[in-house]
Image (cartoon, coloured by chain):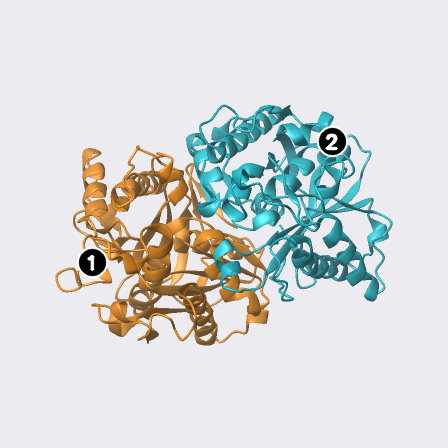
Chain colours: A orange, B cyan
Amino acid sequence: MAQRLGRYTLKMEHMPSIQGYAAVVGKKEGEGPLGKQFDYIYEDTTLGESSWEKAESRLQTDAVNRALKKAGVQSSEIDYIFAGDLLNQCISSTFGLRSLDIPFLGQYGACSTMAQTLALSAILVETGAARRCVAVTSSHFCSAERQFRFPLEYGGQRTPTAQWTVTGSGAAIVGNTGNSPYISAVTVGRITDLGIKDANNMGAAMAPAAYSTLTDFLQDTGTKPSDYDLIVTGDLGEVGSTLLKELLQKDGVDLSKNHADCGLLIFDKENQDVHAGGSGCGCAGSVLCSYLLNRLKSGELNNVLFMATGALMSTTSSQQGESIPGVAHLIHLKSSL
Amino acid sequence: MAQRLGRYTLKMEHMPSIQGYAAVVGKKEGEGPLGKQFDYIYEDTTLGESSWEKAESRLQTDAVNRALKKAGVQSSEIDYIFAGDLLNQCISSTFGLRSLDIPFLGQYGACSTMAQTLALSAILVETGAARRCVAVTSSHFCSAERQFRFPLEYGGQRTPTAQWTVTGSGAAIVGNTGNSPYISAVTVGRITDLGIKDANNMGAAMAPAAYSTLTDFLQDTGTKPSDYDLIVTGDLGEVGSTLLKELLQKDGVDLSKNHADCGLLIFDKENQDVHAGGSGCGCAGSVLCSYLLNRLKSGELNNVLFMATGALMSTTSSQQGESIPGVAHLIHLKSSL
């Protein structure tokens, strides 16, 4: 049974296993530094579908099916699927997963969704409410640009703080038996809003949420950053990562030694013209479900904090002059029991 | 600990208590048959805010604060809040609840959201992962029409199958101690898609999901509709309710005696010009968190199945010619342990 540590953290006594996982991405992501880690790279942004939204749905279908296959389980052996994405009404998830016939719980945490779906999967498995769950998320550069910013055909110029939405999906099968990697603890974040209003500077809007959740976890567990091999944020990018370190520094907490950000890992900043880094649910999702879990599985990493952050605004809220609330959820991953 | 009955149902051994609940609605809902049941009726659709979206956020803030007060608990005593709504990126929830400082898990289940948030709250409380959770949802006629159909100023004519989105919010505090009503079991639904494409006929799109989930529950528990005082659907309205009964009839299951639909309960069909009935997350949310829970609390009802259904499409998916997938989640409510 899950045990509460401090105010915000749930410690897993049985440590659910990530029985299988998979990440599929687009061409640009495949050309980046992590290219060899992904399960499949799609050369065409449409995946042969008639729209980018349908293509994004296909990314989720494919990631889940590959993860199921790698775990050696059928969809009928899954009790719940936790899924979400950035599109209005989460249609990548609902259309991508409708044929699986698995009890479906749609999640909305913006770019924090991979951590949110993993957290709920882990809690349900740990407590015996489920034997096996799927956690999945996706994003697609073209569907996200069309919905949140400008139609691609417009050719708008991107600001230096802008991030590049990752085309990709990550899926993980969480079960009550199995081998490494294991989920050791989860901390669900509170909404944080420091009044940032620039929709082209998501990193700055999300950094305070990451600061809040990481601080909660460190306080609840009585640990410090140096107790972990790696502390990985989702898609703070360059601006948000710097800000997070500054916020922690003020409390005397040093994150300079072992921090990485999925948004900075997935693209080559010098050669891929992505400005402040990658972003989107699919960024943290695809980096976790390839590079990071691979390194935990091999034992190269043993003790990792994965913390995905989300910016909880919409185009309507931005047009109405609202600021951008952020949230961050943290998953403590281990390579041994 | 939750015990699995059959393939899809979780039976609650400890039966979490709904410690407090509240519903706030708009003027039209206040003028309907349930008017006296609501905690507050807003005469003005804007609630004094500068937009309908901000007004909808206020409905959630208000419903949660009233439910907390009635339960006699502070927001600091809540472990998790499960919240969702119909607006793009669920901004009613994120903006309405950002000031509460409660660990936040955004849910997207369209109009099934009240059942989804209650299901997850109940599971976490039952299994000891949380001591107390909040389940909340909302909808607003004006923000929904603007986003999903036509701007109100356009004055478009409504089809006979069209439903009227409820302006309202319902919130419930679920805890591991307390009095009636209790949550006895939950069944999480699978996505169902029979190919309905008419976005003005949501009832027909959602009825197959209700049929699927109710059938799962009845099979898992070995019960029949007559074993319950009332079986309440969320917002199937007139068209969807008729269809649900027809689908069940083919299996020899009789729902004609004790079925009600929140969308048909909340408005006076003859005098309020709502065509096929009320709809929206706030429909099932506000009817549950007033009329239904009041009758369970008083013992007038003892054994109720509450099943909210959601249509999982977006304007984009409809424009791209997609059908409308549906989902339904079921909560078994009891007035005594």
Query: What is the quadrant of residue A248 in the picture?
Result: top left
Q: CA distance from mark 1 to mark 2?
A: 55 Å
Residue A126 on image: x %, y %: 51, 55
Residue appearing at x 77%, y 33% in the figure = B295
Q: Look at the image and tell me whether residue A313 can be seen.
A: no
Q: Which mark is residue B34?
A: 2
Left or right: where does residue A88 sit relative to residue B295?
A: left
Q: Which residue is painted at 42% across and 34% down in the image?
A: B98
Furthest residue toward left: A270
Quadrant where the image shows the C terminus of chain A: bottom left
- Chain label for disc 2: B
Q: Is residue B145 left or right of residue A322?
A: right
Give SS at disc 1: loop
Q: Residues within 10 Å of mark 1 (few under 14, many from 20)?
A: many
How many labels, in total? 2
Query: Do discs 1 and 2 share a chain?
Result: no
| Residue B89, x across and y down, in percent | 44, 47
Is A161 situated left or right of B51 in this image?
left
Give the secondary structure at mark 2: loop
Q: Amino acid at mark 2?
A: Leu
Residue B57, given in percent of the width and then of the height, sits at 49, 33
Residue drawn at point x = 43 percent, y = 55 percent: A87
Q: x, y (%) of residue A287? A: 31, 63
Q: Chain of mark 1?
A: A
Which quadrant of the figure has residue B333? top right
* Residue named by callout 1: A274
Q: Nearer the viewer, residue A324 or A260?
A: A324
Check disc 2: other Cα within 10 Å, few if <14, some if 14-19, many if 20+.
Answer: some
Three-letter residue code for mark 1: Val
